[in-house]
DNA sequence: TTGTATGCGTTATCAC
DNA sequence: GTGATAACGCATACAA
């Protein structure tokens, strides 16, 4: 078939091992033979067979990326594409390849991971979500393969390398921001509480209210599992006798949906309702009004995750570090100081 | 290290080849030994080493996915995540893995492709864009590796398998739709004309105008290379003495930006300006107003591409087929019948 | 139905 | 500095 190291060796009148050494640019080979061999490689159109190398050195130079179920959700979200982009960028620099999980259900994804790990298809893995009762992280811990979590571990925090925001603080700050604008009735639209990020942000929101001596009002807080519920939630919030004057929304895309409902219901944002959301994706910039959004620096998250993983692959660390990426509130049009009239 | 086929063989008192045959569930092995071997595999925690298999059978069961430069752009776009999702889904069903290009520049991407192909890391490749003067497609044609293009080939149409919409018709229909709503001054915001899709849609738009005996007015047509130019374009359109009353916009995200500018400039959509865009992504559904958008059935595109590729990998076809995915206009709020007053 | 021998394309360990 | 030889873990043609 294709030209191999042996073919090159024969034509160059050297041994295969010499050719191999030339490929890895071994210092123990004379410049002269290097030149000769390289010329022959060029002539014959030789190219390294990666799989053979993988088998021989037991390293794949590939990392697996685990997306949350389902990739359908994941990839609709502006978060995942951006994480992926960051991982890609770093991997490219380090000459690593990326392999994605393709499963639709949690079970399929788990199978994908097992295949990656046990089939020795990757040198390490990045998991891009943290979820309750998920088998992936426990499995990876047991497997001894290097892995990094984007998000905070549900358990065994000391034993996993993770990269995350301080979501509690971030949500608390976001809520504080609204409080400082004079809002007292602040609603919350979060996400599926099976995910760590949803829990933590919800806690942050509540922490702020408590700290500011506001009551926690059940009717102002929802954590929908699907985007489909968002419309109904907004309607129910705004149908209250005392509707919230501001909303903390855990995702830009959800916030966009909120804007839509508001527009239809003739609720003016930010005049009657201020909105702060999360992730500061492109959507926050092009919506109308533009969205004040907590920049979670998704690219940084992915970048650091890839960096940590590759470092860990190269040399296992004694202890498992964690990295916290700071968040910044990106102020735009969707929030404004509460006025007298709106507070009634 | 890990337990291999030989270890299993020894413990089960059979030869390695027998174990190998059990793994592939060969009919030439008795049920009895199959059971025995499987039990031992279970006991010892055996798992197939993929790379060894790859080397032995010279098949990777992996397909490469080439994203356009830069993945930054790609992944911001709702299009690419969705294509990727579709490819993932199909690949999972067929037990194929996915490997992504990670390059940022065109040159890096090309290098990624070369690595994939010559390093024999994939059995086939899906290219998710079609661009002028791009080296990837010509290289793949020369390489003889199966590949499928999402989009239409710039040249040598007969020799490449591709999956695409009829973008000319789609854009023509979109424009016709506006014409049928009574619009006569119809503007166009397209994309980088280096991409085939931009050229074709632009042609479709013009075809409609010509067919309907409308003049082609330069001041109504733009094909920006970046999203940053969109704002200025909208302002220039709407600043004309006779501004367009309707717009064909080639992407939902761009349309969202247009909506933003309109809102700020107090241009009412659809009252003063109707907008039809492309791709029918989630954004079209949650924007306000919701966007009438040409559904290009991106998931179908990706799905068919993966299907064609895997078929081609399994059995090279004599001729290179192409698949055209139909488009449908998804009608929403952003378009309306032209009224007398608005046409002045 | 099962076993033997060989190959897949590298790298690594010794020699020389 | 360079070469022979043995892995790496599995698949497969050929025997039996």
Image (cartoon, coloured by chain):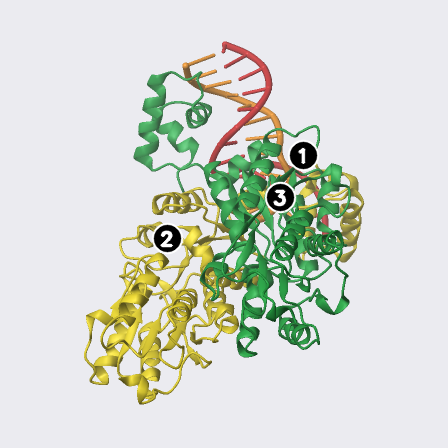
Chain colours: A green, B yellow, C red, D orange
Instruction: Say whether marks 2 and 1 touch (CB < 8 Å).
Output: no
> Quick check: can you spot residue B91?
no
Indicate whether B141 appears above or below A243: above
Q: In the rendered image, which quarter is residue B188 located in?
A: bottom left
Name the residue located 35 percent from the left edge and 17 percent from the top edge.
A31
Q: Quadrant of the C terminus of chain B?
A: bottom left
Residue at the farthest bottom position: B340
Instruction: Say whether marks 1 and 3 touch (CB < 8 Å).
Output: no
Mark 2 vs mark 3: tell me if same chain.
Answer: no
The residue tagged 1 is: A321
Q: From mark 2 to mark 1, how far is it between C-alphas?
A: 46 Å
- Of all chains, the one bearing label 2 is B
- Left or right: residue A120 versus residue B174 is right
The residue tagged 2 is: B144
Element carrying mark 1:
loop
- Left or right: residue D12 versus residue B112 is right
Image coordinates for residue A203, horizontal then vertical, percent: 73, 54
Residue placed most toward the observer, A147 or A213: A213
Q: From mark 1 to mark 3, how far is it between C-alphas?
A: 16 Å
Residue at the farthest front position: A340
Image coordinates for residue B269, horizontal then vertical, percent: 40, 77
The numbered mark, 1 or 3, whose residue comes first in the sequence reads 3
Indicate whether B187 appears above or below A25: below
Mark 2 vs mark 1: tell me if same chain.
Answer: no
Image coordinates for residue A145, horizontal then vertical, percent: 67, 39
């Amino acid at each position: 078939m294709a030209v191999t190291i042996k073919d090159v060796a024969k034509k160059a009148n050297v041994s295969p091992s010499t050719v191999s050494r030339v490929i890895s640019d071994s210092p123990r080979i004379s410049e002269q033979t290097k030149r000769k061999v390289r010329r022959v490689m060029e002539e014959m159109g030789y190219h390294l067979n990666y799989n053979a190398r993988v088998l021989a050195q037991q390293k794949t130079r590939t990392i697996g990326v685990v997306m949350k179920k389902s990739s359908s959700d994941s990839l609709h979200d502006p978060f995942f594409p951006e994480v992926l982009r960051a991982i890609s960028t770093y991997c490219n620099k380090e000459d690593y390849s990326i392999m994605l999980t393709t499963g639709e259900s949690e079970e399929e994804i788990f199978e994908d991971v097992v295949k990656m790990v046990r089939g020795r298809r990757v040198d390490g893995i990045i998991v891009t979500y943290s979820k309750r009762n998920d088998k992936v992280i426990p499995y990876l811990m047991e497997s001894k393969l290097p892995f990094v979590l984007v998000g905070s571990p549900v358990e065994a925090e000391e034993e996993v390398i993770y990269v995350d925001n301080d979501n509690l603080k971030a949500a608390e700050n976001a809520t504080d921001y609204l409080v400082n604008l004079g809002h007292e009735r602040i609603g919350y639209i979060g996400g599926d509480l099976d995910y760590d990020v949803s829990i933590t942000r919800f806690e942050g929101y509540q922490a702020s209210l408590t700290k500011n001596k506001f009551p926690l009002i059940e009717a102002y807080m929802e954590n929908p599992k699907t985007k489909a519920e968002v419309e109904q939630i907004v309607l129910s919030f705004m149908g209250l006798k005392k509707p919230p004057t501001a909303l903390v929304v855990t995702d830009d895309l959800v916030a966009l949906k909120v804007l839509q409902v508001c527009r239809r219901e003739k609720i003016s944002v930010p005049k009657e309702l201020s909105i702060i959301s999360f992730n500061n994706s492109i959507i926050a910039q092009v919506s109308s009004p533009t969205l004040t959004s907590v920049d979670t620096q998704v690219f940084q998250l992915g970048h650091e995750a890839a960096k940590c993983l590759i470092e860990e692959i190269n040399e296992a660390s004694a202890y498992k570090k964690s990295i916290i990426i700071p968040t910044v509130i990106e102020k735009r049009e969707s929030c404004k100081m509460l006025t007298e009239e709106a507070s009634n």
